[in-house]
Image: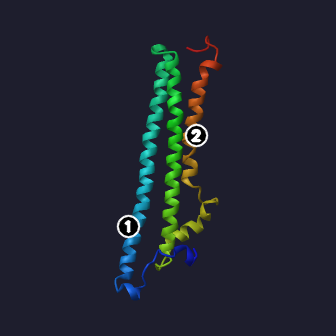
Amino acid sequence: MSQQSNKGLIQYTKETYGDSFGTDLLEQYKLYVQSAEHVSARRVASSRYLLTLNIALVTLYGIQSEGFVQGYWTMLVPILGIPVSGLWYQIIQSHRDLNTVKFDIIHQLEEHLPVALYAHEWQVAGEGRGTPYRAVTRIEKGIPIAFVVLHIMLFLAPFLVPSDFLI
């Protein structure tokens, strides 16, 4: 990180702030790392909820296609599932973007601490591009994409599969 990138981040020096500068900087650092962890926890909670919602929609489709309620209602489920999955993808991306910013700031704060653990870990991991590390969000975004594909297939199934083939 360049000094220019953290301009405005550190507003005082130890001389202008006082003796508690190091202690207060460390406490703020800990709080900020905790806030990054909370973003990840919110992402997991959102993904759990949207996964459950998608599974419920696919289950509802299965119940409908078994003859309880057939017709246009069966097509409504995938029509609802596609935007739910798209929203899920966007939420994952939004959380990833927010954590990217947070970890850039954490790296900048670490320039003023004795050890830069997160910055070093990121460097060792190939900055998210190497073999030792594959960003979880890259993998995680595949799940809503798979559900979009599934919902499209469920929507098209009545048009593509012969009616005598359907149960």
Q: Residue at x 46, y 25 (%)?
A: 60
Residue that carries the numbered disc 1 in the rendered image: 31
Q: Is residue 162 above or below residue 19?
A: above
Q: Residue at x 48, y 14 (%)?
A: 67
Local SS, label 2: helix
Rendered image quadrant of residue 10: bottom left
- Position of the N terminus, as image quadrant, is bottom right
Answer whether labels 2 and 1 touch (C-beta < 8 Å). no
Q: Position of residue 88 (x, y in %)?
A: 50, 42
How far is mark 2 from mark 1, CA to CA? 34 Å
With 83 as the anchor, is 41 left or right in this view?
left
Q: Is residue 99 above or below residue 52?
A: below
Would you name the residue on which mark 2 appears?
145
Image x and y of residue 89, in percent:
53, 44
Amino acid of disc 2: Ile
- Give whichever of discs 2 and 1 has the lower sequence position: 1
- Locate residue 100, reporting x and y percent: 53, 60
Disc 1 marks a residue whose amino acid type is: Leu
Is label 1 in a helix, a strand or a loop? Answer: helix
Q: Residues within 10 Å of mark 2 (few under 14, many from 20)?
A: some
**How far across and down, in percent of the image, does residue 102 sit?**
48, 63
Q: Nearer the viewer, residue 8 or 149?
A: 8
Would residue 110 appear left or right of 38 to someone viewing this image?
Answer: right
